[in-house]
Image (tube, grey):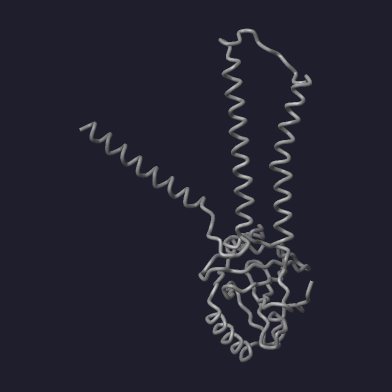
Amino acid sequence: MLKKMIGILFVTFVVTQSSAFAGFWAGAVPPEIISTNGHEIDNLFMYTTWLNIVYFILVCAGLFGFSYLYWYKRSPKAYYTYGNKKEHLVVTMIIGAAVFLSIDLNITRMSNDDMINEFWKFPDASKEEVIQIEVLAQQWMWNFRYAGVDGKFNTADDVLSNHDLRIPVGKKVEFRISSKDVIHSLYFPNARLKADAIPGRITRLWFQPTKTGEFDIACAEMCGTHHYLMKAKLRVETEEDYKLWLGEAERLALAGNDVDNLDNYWGWKWEEQ
């Protein structure tokens, strides 16, 4: 009877721990990438992670290896050194240079290339179709503005949306971002992108979605007591569904926008930068 109870307890422990481990591992898996350039961020992260693992293994090998080689039974006479001999300095310099070149300098090179060739290579609206959206952050809300049928921002036919961002799949989307009060950070986990929303300043980011669906938008900057509430939804739709939604939203905007409500006119003139 006792053995049976111990067996049941053991099986229960294994099952619960396996579930806990599975839950932890599921939480550690990054969200699905839905942008054309999001993989660049993951590549940089994985490169950094694997190199740190390699150097960690080397450090552990040296630590335990020297502990074994200089075990007191193997080396009863202690060897004292200040590490200032020529051969010691040479080894230290080689290790330091290897770490600096393979990790620090190479990460800087990779991230600089990604910024210049991908993330700062903003689409040119004069040469291709670009969805332009203005974003105003405030405690604790994301406000989105689309230019209406006149193609100009901050006019009576603009489409305004709170916490609900819709964009078409396969199209490049550029965001111009500012803040009404404190510093926030517009974060698209599935695009691996974020940009600070700063009062009195306009920041920018862009990406091209590759998959339809509903995804999270978060604030990645501690912005106050209700920071945790500052979340929105990104809905990537087919071009047909997006045009249907935008057409209906423009019709409602023209019919219902209050021209006397100054809170509706927080936008700004869109200029090429």
Q: Which sits in the foreground, 133 or 115?
A: 115
Foreground of the two, 30 or 101: 101
Q: Quadrant of residue 255?
A: bottom right
Q: Where is residue 89 drawn, in percent x and y?
A: 77, 25
Q: Residue at x 69, y 66 (%)?
A: 205
Mark count: 0
In the rendered image, which quarter is residue 266 located in? bottom right
Q: Is residue 8 above or below residue 115?
A: above
How far across and down, in percent of the image, does residue 105 sit?
Answer: 74, 44
Please tell me whether residue 229 is drawn above or below residue 235 in the rendered image: above
Q: Nearer the viewer, residue 185 or 74?
A: 74
x then y, percent, for residue 202: 76, 69
Q: Is residue 96 above or below residue 149?
A: above
- Which corner quadrant holds the N terminus? top left
Residue furthest to the left: 1
Q: Quadrant of residue 74?
A: top right
In the shown orientation, is residue 12 left or right of residue 41? left
Relative placement, left or right, of 64 versus 157 is: left
Picture residue at 61% right of the left edge, 77% below the top: 161
Please report the residue visible at 79 percent of the width from the left and 21 percent of the height from the top: 86
Q: Residue furthest bottom?
A: 255
Q: Residue furthest top?
A: 77
The quadrant of the rendering that contains the C terminus is: bottom right
